[in-house]
Image (spheres, rainbow, N blue to C red):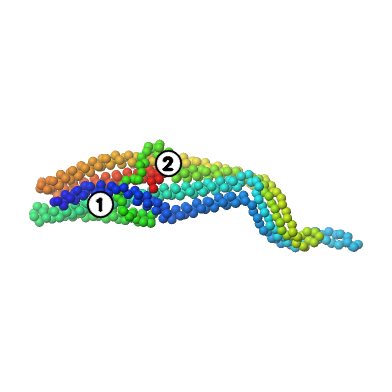
């Protein structure tokens, strides 16, 4: 009988055995996922790509130098007749075999903002790539946190199952003693054994789910928790009303930063489209050797040239105007996407806040139910000890305690996940 009282005590406090704050382990796992998960290496490489795009865009405004070599055969060539020594002699104005080697240089003096528009577009792309890393970190932190707290929930649920199974085993042993003494029937023993089998099956299901969560955590972080936390204490307090939470999301959530980056990208593309078809003024110079100079037209001679070239596009089939209209449409699309994102986040934040408030209220009620079930269990044990209660009453009372503890655990877990969700939506960095 003392063993039953001891197990009832263990069962009654099983939901309070794990109150230590292990939020440091969660932060470690989240940061570990940032360096382990391959996606972040890919995103880091995307940042490097955009940095190279900026350098490439700047290079479009720099000078260019090229070495050219050419050969050209001409036939027929122009000839003139000149009197020489009292006779007419034919002279070629240009050779049939033309050779040229040149070093040409070109430098853009004025491009009406074409290069600047390209650089601004590349810079907007770089900012998008950087903010995309932050968005992926926010998503990954939520995923790791969800797995982490699911593991904590399953461990505490298994601990409750272990307490129930231990209680039933001791109860079965005492009932078998009563059966031998003629104070119980075989049916009582078989009923308890059936309950033990059912609880063992529930524990197996819980353990299977726990193992899957461990595999998911190893997939995202490369390791399993070292301490095995069963703590539901969220690292930070993020209670807020809808208006403040939505404002926080608009300023801190990486997804809002991404949509703002998309708008800036579209604006930069529009500016670049407006520079299409603009005139350009460039400085050209070259030097080298070529033949074709009179009077010895076949002889290679040194030459050089320098000048300024103004290019003014006149007609391109309306391409510039069509590109501007396309860019304007893309900009409007990005702005409308921001409105849609605001609407979606308002709905999601409101639901998360409802979950937080309802689970807090449910926790208060379930805590009362746990106390009531524990008191009823004590009464059932007292009646059973004094010989006026039945084993069925005691088992039923213990089952009610188990259900109350699991319900309380469920509300505690749901509250933690709701807080985790709100932190993800508002862009709160809890790692």
Q: Which residue is at a point 38% across and 56% down the rendered structure image?
A: 222
Q: Where 93 falls versus 138 (above or below)?
A: below
Any part of residue 399 in sight: no
How packed mark 2 is, by other alpha carbons closer than 10 Å (few <14, some 14-19, many 20 or more), is: many
List x then y, in percent, for residue 304.
73, 55
SS at badge 2: helix
List x then y, in percent, for residue 240.
37, 38
Q: How many marks?
A: 2
How packed mark 1 is, by other alpha carbons closer than 10 Å (few <14, some 14-19, many 20 or more), is: some
Q: Which residue is at a point 10% across and 48% down the rendered structure image?
A: 387
Q: Which residue is at a point 9% across and 52% down the rendered structure image?
A: 183
Any part of residue 431 in sight: yes
Lateral position of residue 299 relative to residue 67, left or right? right
Q: Earlier in the sequence, mark 1 or mark 2?
A: 1
Q: Give the residue furthest to the right.
A: 86
List x then y, in percent, for residue 266.
53, 44
Q: Which residue is at a point 35% across and 51% down the rendered structure image?
A: 25
Residue at which label 2 appears: 249
Residue at which label 1 appears: 159
Lateral position of residue 419 relative to residue 312, left or right? left
> Could you say which is closer to the camera, residue 97 or residue 135?
135
Q: Are marks 1 and 2 in contact (CB under 8 Å)?
A: no
SS at badge 1: helix
Lateral position of residue 277 relative to residue 355, left or right? right
């Amino acid at each position: 009988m003392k063993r039953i009282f001891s197990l009832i005590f263990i069962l009654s406090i099983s939901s309070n055995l794990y109150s230590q704050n292990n939020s440091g382990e969660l932060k470690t796992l989240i940061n570990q996922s940032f360096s382990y998960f391959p996606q972040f290496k890919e995103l880091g490489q995307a940042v490097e790509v955009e940095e190279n795009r900026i350098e490439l865009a700047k290079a479009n405004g720099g000078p260019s130098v090229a070495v050219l070599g050419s050969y050209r055969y001409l036939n027929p060539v122009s000839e003139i007749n000149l009197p020489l020594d009292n006779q007419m002699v034919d002279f070629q104005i240009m050779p049939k075999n033309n050779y040229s080697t040149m070093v040409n240089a070109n430098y853009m003096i004025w491009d009406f903002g074409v290069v600047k528009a390209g650089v601004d577009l590349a810079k907007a792309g770089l900012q998008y790539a950087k903010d995309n890393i932050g968005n992926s970190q926010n998503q990954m932190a939520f995923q790791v946190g969800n797995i982490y707290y699911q593991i904590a929930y399953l461990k505490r649920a298994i601990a409750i199952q272990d307490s129930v199974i231990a209680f039933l085993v001791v109860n079965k042993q005492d009932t078998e003693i009563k059966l031998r003494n003629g104070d119980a029937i075989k049916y009582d023993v078989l009923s308890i054994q059936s309950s033990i089998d059912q609880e063992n099956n529930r524990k197996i299901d819980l353990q299977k789910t726990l193992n899957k969560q461990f595999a998911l955590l190893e997939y995202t972080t490369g390791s399993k928790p070292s301490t095995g936390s069963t703590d539901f204490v969220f690292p930070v307090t993020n209670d807020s009303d809808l208006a403040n939470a939505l404002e926080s999301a608009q300023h801190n959530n990486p997804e809002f930063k991404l949509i703002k980056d998309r708008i800036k990208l579209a604006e930069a593309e529009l500016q670049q489209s407006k520079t299409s078809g603009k005139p350009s003024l460039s400085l050209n110079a070259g030097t080298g050797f070529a033949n074709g100079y009179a009077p010895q037209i076949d002889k290679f001679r040194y030459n050089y040239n320098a000048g300024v070239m103004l290019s003014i596009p006149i007609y391109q089939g309306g391409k510039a105007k069509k590109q501007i209209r396309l860019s304007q449409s893309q900009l409007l699309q990005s702005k409308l996407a921001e409105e849609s994102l605001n609407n979606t986040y308002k709905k999601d934040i409101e639901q998360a806040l409802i979950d937080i408030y309802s689970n807090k209220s449910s926790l208060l009620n379930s805590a009362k139910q746990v106390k009531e079930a524990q008191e009823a269990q004590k009464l059932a044990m007292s009646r059973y000890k004094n010989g006026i209660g039945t084993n069925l009453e005691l088992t039923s009372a213990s089952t009610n305690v188990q259900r109350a503890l699991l319900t309380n655990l469920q509300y505690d877990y749901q509250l933690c996940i709701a807080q985790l969700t709100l932190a993800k939506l508002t862009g709160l960095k809890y790692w």
